[in-house]
Image: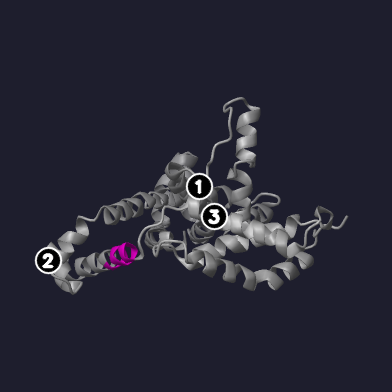
Amino acid sequence: MYAATTEKEVETRVRELAPLVKRIAHHMMAALPPSVEIDDVIQSGMMGLLDAARRYQTSEGAQFETYAVQRIRGAMLDGLRQCDWLPRGVRRSLREAEKMISKLEQQNGRPPTEAELAKAMDMSLTDYQRLLQDDSFWLALTHSIVYLLVTPVLIFLSIGLAILVNRRLRGVSIYRALYFVPAVAGSIAIGLSWRFLFDRSGFVNAVLQWLGLIDEPIQWLATPGLVLPLAMLLTIWAGVGYYAVIFLAGLQNIPEEQYDAARIDGCNDWQTHRHVSLPGLRPQIVFVFVISSLAALKVFDEI
């Protein structure tokens, strides 16, 4: 029995059949609504191909291409079921409206009126009001606003993590490297690890069933009400290490004399960080707030 276990063998198989994924995706697009993005379908197919390359065994009695086609199609269909597809026009209008609102607020120093927004977007007031009455538009806008909740959570967790590792401890360099791993991991690696955790037969369902908390596996990645929270959790997990490095650099620029003065005044650890660390990190907090908010507003393009 032969199994593709080495990364070199997996990489070779993926490279050879990568064009097949695009052909299957283009063929499948003929039966899908126009709102579906072909790049998203291809990405799901590539994940299926990578999974097939890792699992394939010659003892199964099928050529690898035949085996891979089944996995690729299955991954594409899973991806379509997991996503709440919004029309491309609605996504584009949402992005344009968000950019224009921000631009006009900066120019005028106040929120723009509907008439000003319509004129700036080169449309009539009636067309703009019709856009606002589109249920899909408001659904997309609501998702974007909810997704912004990841920003304060990211800032809080990143500052806490930076404070924990900003100490002279044995092996602290190893801990700093470990929490930064998700920030440098590839999207395919992150997708596979997330799938391992939340798939129907994944680790989370196995633990919950072992504890007796559930009788049947939960479809974490195929339930519309769970997709958005899981996507937010993924963003936090993947980004907390990156932003922690920014806050760690800011902490190391705060003069040690300020901490010594706080301790002399009788401050405990919590009071020291509240009155010394947080004020010293104000520039980094503003920077992280801006870039993480912008990233959160654009994340649905990636999903």
Asked if residue 147 lies left or right of residue 208, the reply is left
Residue drawn at x 23%, y 65% as measured from the top left: 101
| Mark 1 crowdedness (10 Å alpha carbons): few <14, some 14-19, many ≥20 | some
Q: How many marks?
A: 3
| Mark 2 crowdedness (10 Å alpha carbons): few <14, some 14-19, many ≥20 | some
Residue picked out by circle 3:
77
Q: Are marks 1 and 3 in contact (CB under 8 Å)?
A: no
Residue picked out by circle 1:
160
Residue picked out by circle 2:
125
Q: Amino acid at mark 3?
A: Leu
Between the residue at mark 2 and the residue at mark 3, the CA separation in whole angstroms equals 40 Å
Residue drawn at x 31%, y 62% as measured from the top left: 90
Residue 224 image offset from top left, x and y in percent: 43, 45
* Residue nearer the viewer, 66 or 98: 66
| Mark 3 crowdedness (10 Å alpha carbons): few <14, some 14-19, many ≥20 | some
**Which of pointers 2 and 3 indicates the residue nearer the eye?**
3
Q: Is residue 293 magenta?
A: no
Q: Amino acid at mark 2?
A: Leu
Residue 216 image offset from top left, x and y in percent: 58, 31
Where does the N terminus fall, quadrant-wise? bottom right
- Mark before the other along the chain sequence, 2 or 3: 3
Between the residue at mark 1 and the residue at mark 2, the CA separation in whole angstroms equals 47 Å
Between the residue at mark 1 and the residue at mark 3, the CA separation in whole angstroms equals 40 Å
Q: Quadrant of residue 97?
A: bottom left
Q: Quadrant of residue 301?
A: bottom left
Residue drawn at x 59%, y 62% as measured from the top left: 45
Q: Which stretch is magenta?
A: 89-96
Question: In this rendering, does residue 65 appear at all?
Answer: yes
Asked if residue 255 lies left or right of residue 196, the reply is left
Tag 3 secondary structure:
helix
Tag 2 secondary structure:
helix
